Image (spheres, helix red, strand yellow):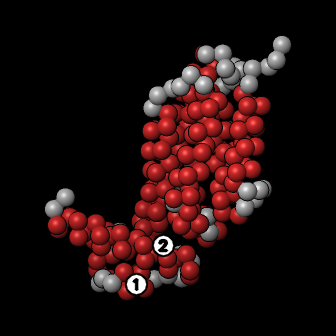
Amino acid sequence: MDRKMKKSETTKERIVTSALKLIGQKGFNATPVREIVAEAGCAKGTFYLYFETKMDLLKHFAIQLFDSFNRMFQAELSELEDDPFAQIDRLFDRLYATMKESEGHLRLLHNGEILNLVLEQNFGRPYLEAIIGQLAGVLQAGIDGGYFRPVDPQLYARILFGIGHELLESALLHAYPGTTETVKKELAAIIRRILAQPKE
């Protein structure tokens, strides 16, 4: 990366960091672009080199988060392992670690005002579909290998991701319904109850 590109990326990152801080403090609608750029130490016109609107900035936050989840799932599920239960456990451990690394983005995007905007715009749909497809592949392999009872892999991938994502996110952001360690332990037990072959 040449110096000009590196400077451009640094400026963009300053704007993003400033926006994350200010929007987190004041809210999305109450934070004007002029305050974001003042905090970032650049001119107002610089903002518009990177983002057409504040909504584009919000989309940037959401896509960064969804992309980090998707890359993590791709890395963790690139090879199917002999014990799919253990692989799913590790997957949810990594999901939590990725959430923890992105806690600032998560807190911002789960603010009521912003969450509604993100859900309306549906920024994450392509990423979610990719994640569900990868998880469905693990479920199908577990069914084929006799580890899991026969289920609809696409449906159960959505169910498991929904349960895991919601519980881990709630534990991180609100310490509810318990500590992260308790939630991860119980999540592993729940997944086994949902997927295990019935005992004869």
Question: Which residue carries the number 1 mark?
Answer: 39
**Residue at image point 40% right, 84% down:** 39
Amino acid type, mark 2: Leu
Please identify the quarter of the rendering in which residue 137 is found: top right
Question: Which residue carries the number 2 mark?
Answer: 20
**Is 41 rendered above or below residue 142?**
below
Label 1–label 2 contact, CB within 8 A: no
Q: Is residue 150 left or right of residue 110?
A: right
- Marks 1 and 2 sit apart, C-alpha to C-alpha, by 11 Å
Where residue 125 appears, x then y in whole percent?
52, 47
The quarter in which the C terminus is drawn is: top right
Residue 169 in sight in this render: yes
Q: Nearer the viewer, residue 146 or 28?
A: 146
**Is 83 rendered above or below residue 187?**
above
Please identify the quarter of the rendering in which residue 71 is found: top left
- Residue 67 badge: none
Q: Of marks 1 and 2, which one's residue comes earlier in the chain?
A: 2
Where residue 118 appears, x then y in whole percent?
55, 61
**Residue at image point 62% right, 32% down:** 86
Amino acid type, mark 1: Glu
Q: Nearer the viewer, residue 126 or 42?
A: 42
Q: Is residue 188 left or right of residue 13?
A: right
Q: Secondary structure at mark 2?
A: helix
**Residue at image point 60% right, 25% down:** 83
The quarter in which the N terminus is drawn is: bottom left
**Residue at image point 16% right, 62% down:** 2
